[in-house]
Amino acid sequence: MDVFTFPSILRRWWWVLASVVAVALAGIGAQVATAPTTYETRVRVQITAPQFEDLSLFDNGNRSSSYLRDDLTRARNNFAAVARSGSVYDRTIEALHLAAPDHIYNVDVRPVTDSDFVDLVFSTRTALRARLIADEHAAQALKYYGELRAKPAAAMATLLAAETARARSSLFGSHAMEASWAADAASTSLGDVTSSVEAQHARETYKFLLGKYLEAVLNEKQALRATYIQVVEPAPSPTPRSPLRTFAGLLGLTLVGSLGLGMLLALVLDSLFRKKSVSPAFSSIADATPLAVGHSG
């Protein structure tokens, strides 16, 4: 087969090509006819540069602008993953006590180009509770994102609480030591220099750990709030979405795919029928060849 014989093959097997395309389009038409009408609404969220809630025991200096850009991109990606997570779906369904068909809905995260905004686009089966579902889902996504973001600070706060308690126990372990420190503070003499140095070191360690613990608690509360992610536009009234819009792109792909499949099937059938028609001719020539040789001899 070459380029010049291909059109003749398609003309010969046009009914195969038309049948494949017709069956594919009929299947798409059946899906469009049976697909329910959905309702669409959106919630717009603004994501700015996130705060750095991770606590370090020592100062690491100021973060560069490249780190801030990476943090912003990471915050957007993390929030998109949280908004699509099953945990947020379950929390929304439980909070609104949704039953069929209201509990069946989809959410799509669409970043707005060249901006800090992200749209949460919701598709629901009914229009009655579409706005309520969208707003509640966005609120639950923000809450769950804050909880996940606060986990490192919460773990650090737990660790520092134990270390601070241990430092306090060593500092105020006995009333006799407290009285001794009070006496040392009231007197002008240094007394036991070794004990005074150890007491000063214990005080500084306790104050340092206590300050870090309070900072970790504050970071945990700040992370829970996630103030750099805000809902700026609640969900408006939903609009109906025709199934034709959903299947418009699929229709083009189905048409192209069915045409390709029909052409391939036409080529296969033409090749099979050519082999069947050529094989008897070869066998008859093979049978006649010995007779011709013997007659000539």
Image: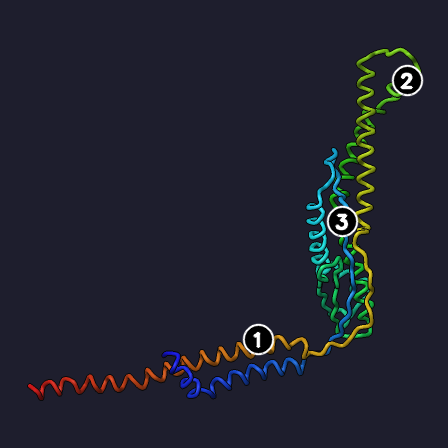
The vertical placement of 68 against 248, above or below, is above
Nearer mark to the viewer, of 2 and 3 = 3
Q: Identify the residue at image location x=73%, y=56%.
A: 79
The vertical placement of 146 against 103, above or below, is above
Q: Distance between the residues labelled 3 and 1?
A: 41 Å
Mark yes or no: residue 250 visible: yes
Q: In which quarter of the image is residue 235?
A: bottom right
Q: Identify the residue at image location x=89%, y=15%.
A: 184
- Bin the neighbour count of mark 2 within 10 Å (Cα to Cα): few under 14, some 14-19, many 20 and up: few
Element type at mark 2: helix
Residue at the left extreme, as displayed: 297
Q: Which of marks 3 and 1 is nearer the N terminus?
A: 3
- Bin the neighbour count of mark 1 within 10 Å (Cα to Cα): few under 14, some 14-19, many 20 and up: few
Nearer mark to the viewer, of 1 and 2 = 1
Q: Which of 125 and 74 is in front in this view?
A: 74
Residue at the right extreme, as displayed: 186
Q: Earlier in the sequence, mark 2 or mark 3?
A: 3
| Residue 47 image offset from top left, x and y in percent | 76, 55
Q: Residue 185 carries which label?
A: 2
| Residue 134 image offset from top left, x and y in percent | 79, 66
Quarter in which the C terminus is drawn: bottom left
Q: Distance between the residues labelled 1 and 2?
A: 85 Å
The residue that label 3 is drawn on is: 50
The residue that label 1 is drawn on is: 253
| Residue 232 image offset from top left, x and y in percent | 82, 60
Quarter in which the N terminus is drawn: bottom left
Q: Given the image, on which type of amino acid does mark 3 rest?
A: Pro
Q: Earlier in the sequence, mark 1 or mark 2?
A: 2
Q: Nearer the viewer, residue 102 or 31?
A: 31
Q: Given the image, on which type of amino acid does mark 1 rest?
A: Leu
Q: Is residue 247 left or right of residue 294?
A: right
Q: Given the image, on which type of amino acid does mark 2 rest?
A: Ala
